[in-house]
Structures are given as C-alpha cells and as structure tokens.
Image (cartoon, rainbow, N blue to C red):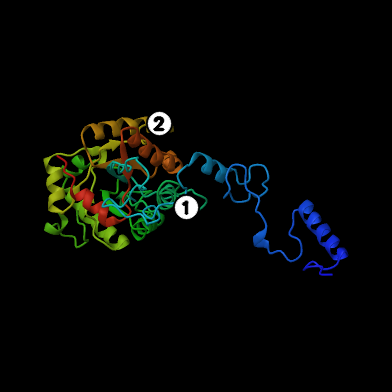
Amino acid sequence: MNRGPLGTPTTLLLSLSLLLWGALAGCSPPGMTPASRSKPRSRNNAKASPRTRSTPYRNSAPRLAASKKLPSTKPSPEATKPRRETQSGSQASHPISSAPPPKAAAKKDVIEVVLTFDDGPHANPPVHGMNYTQKVYRTLKNNILQNNITAVFFVQSHAPGRGATPTGQDMITLLARGGHVVGIHTGSTADHANHRSRAAVRPYDVNGNRVLDAADGANGLESDMIRAKARIRKLAGREPLYVRPTYGERNRTVKAAYRWQRLKMILWDIDTGDNTGSPSVDQVNLNIDDGMRRCVAAGKKQVVILFHDINSRTALNLEEYIGNIRISARRLGKTVVFPTTAERVIQILNAKTYE
C-alpha cells in the first residue's frame, strides 16, 4: 500500500500536531524558514520603528521635536566658526543674534593733579610717626588710592626748626631720593620770611669772602635764593627749578629776582586751607570741593593743589584728602590722575603761567 510522502499514519498525526502547535504559538514549525512567517504590522504605520521604553522626562525633547517638526538644535556651520575681531577690537555679534554690537565706552576727561607742600621740612625725630614730612612721604608712596605719587616740596632751606636742622636736611635728601621735586620756599634764617620784604633789603655775603659782589645778588631776596639753591643742590643732588613766594605775595622786584636766579614761580590752583587757623578735616574737604568745581568750570586740565607738610592734620589725613580729590572730580564727570614721575611733574609745572 502506497502511503505517500507523509509516511505512516503516526507520522501524519505528528505532522498535523506540529502545524496546529505552530499556529497557536505564532512561530514557524520545524522546516519552515523565517522569511515564510508573516510579519506583524503596526496599526498606524507598517514601517514604524519599534519604540524603546522610556522613563519620565527622558527622550521627551526628541518626541516633541518629531511631533511638532521643530528645527534641529544642531548649530549651523556659520555658527561654529570663530568670531572675528572688529576694527574697534571687540568681538562681532553671533550670526543668529539680531542685537547690535555694544558701543565703545566714551573716554572720560582726565585732570592731572600735582600735590605741593609748603613750609617744611619738619624737624621732629623721624620715629613713631613724629616727623610729619616723613609721614607725608610714606603716604604718597603707599596708599589705597594710588601708590608712588610724585609731589613738589617747597622747603625752607635755612630756617630754624626746618632746613637748618640735621633732621630737616635729612628729610630734603629723603624727598629727592624718593623721586619728588624739591623747590625753594625761603632761604632766609627767619621762618616764613616774606619775599617782598626780603627784596627790599640789602644783599649779604653768601659765599663768605667778605665782599659784596654780583655773586651775592642784588638784594636780600636774591641772596636768599642763591644760598637756598646751594644747599638744595648739595642735599638733593640737583639744581632746584622752582620757587613759591610765602603767602603768594610778590611784586616786580620779587619776580625779577626769580628771573635772575633762573627760578620759575609756581603758585597754586586750589588752596586747601589746611594751615589757616586750625581747620577740621571736613572743612579742608569742603575747600577741595569748591576748588575743584572752579577748576573744572575754568576748563583746567592740570591742577596744582597747596598743602603744608608741617601740619599734623595734613600728615595724618592726607590719604583721605587724596580720596576726596578724586571723589570731587568724579562728581563733575572728571577722572583724576596723579603723576608718578618727576619728569611728568616738571612738564606740568613748566606749562603753568602765573602773573
């Protein structure tokens, strides 16, 4: 009996069982290839890729981008290029930014301020802050506002308790070695001698040769200037270039004496009044404020300020005064700069003219 390709009834029964099991289990029976299986199709899209299981908030951005068709967050090739420097030195704006580039800050008006000190040097022992000239010197060198400020000191070279003392002479040397400019206030043996009075008296023997000649000058003031120049030259190592009359008083004879001795007269633009009576620190600051307003109104770019280094309050509060000079100028839209070299101070003083 021919049983066909399926073989015996037992074999036929086994084959039917496997077909039924495969249909129920959803897999191919033995001998069938995977390609012959029918692939499950998505309800909405037959070609949709299988979704991955996600946790809350993870992969939410890609889904939102896909559903709303947002533009890609990948930067464009232009955005990845390095920014170019503009002619003004600032970086160009980002290509995707519509904001205009920031404007360059306007240059502020600058006022150069030269601090000057009269009547010294102080002759107290230079220990424990007792010497006011030394304290002023140290404040100019180190302070919280601007270090190494160069100033001008108009000294009394032969006055008792000033340049006539060994300590006073040491202070003159200290000032010169520290880079400051040393000028003449008096050369008389009297303290704070008036220049007009000194110009009205006869000259005296400066060089000690017991002969009055042209080397001694034409009057007492010229003799004082000759003597002061010689001492300052010895102590400071350089010839003094400037003179300041006591009280600011001068006349034709006084100015002629300065010219004959090749000294340029320097006055001031702001008198702080620190040596007039016993002013408080607040009063000195008010005087600085008033003086700065007048200088700015007059359009001055270089300002000379008068202090006194033998004044105890000035020595103790100089740092505050320096700060107030800057604050006063800032209120008026100006920026104060203090020169830091003798060369710059000399340039400023040479440009000054006084009658």
Residue drawn at point x = 22 percent, y = 48 percent: 349
- Residue at position x 48%, y 42% in the image: 69
Hey, which residue is sitting farthest front in the picture? Answer: 1
x and y, in percent, of residue 223 in the image: 19, 52
In the rendered image, is residue 118 in sight?
Answer: no
One can see residue 344 in this view? yes
Taking 306 as reference, is 219 left or right? left
> What amino acid is labelled 2 in the image?
Pro
Local packing at callout 2 (Cα closer than 10 Å; few below 14, some 14-19, many 20+) is some
Question: Element type at marker 1?
Answer: loop
Q: Which residue is under mark 1?
A: 125
Tally of numbered discs: 2
Q: Is residue 85 above or below residue 268?
A: below
Q: Amino acid at mark 1?
A: Pro
Which residue is label 2 attached to?
Answer: 279
Which quadrant would residue 192 be assigned to in this image? Answer: top left
Spot occupied by residue 266 in the image (x, y as percentages of width and height): 22, 45
Please identify the quadrant where the N terminus is shown: bottom right
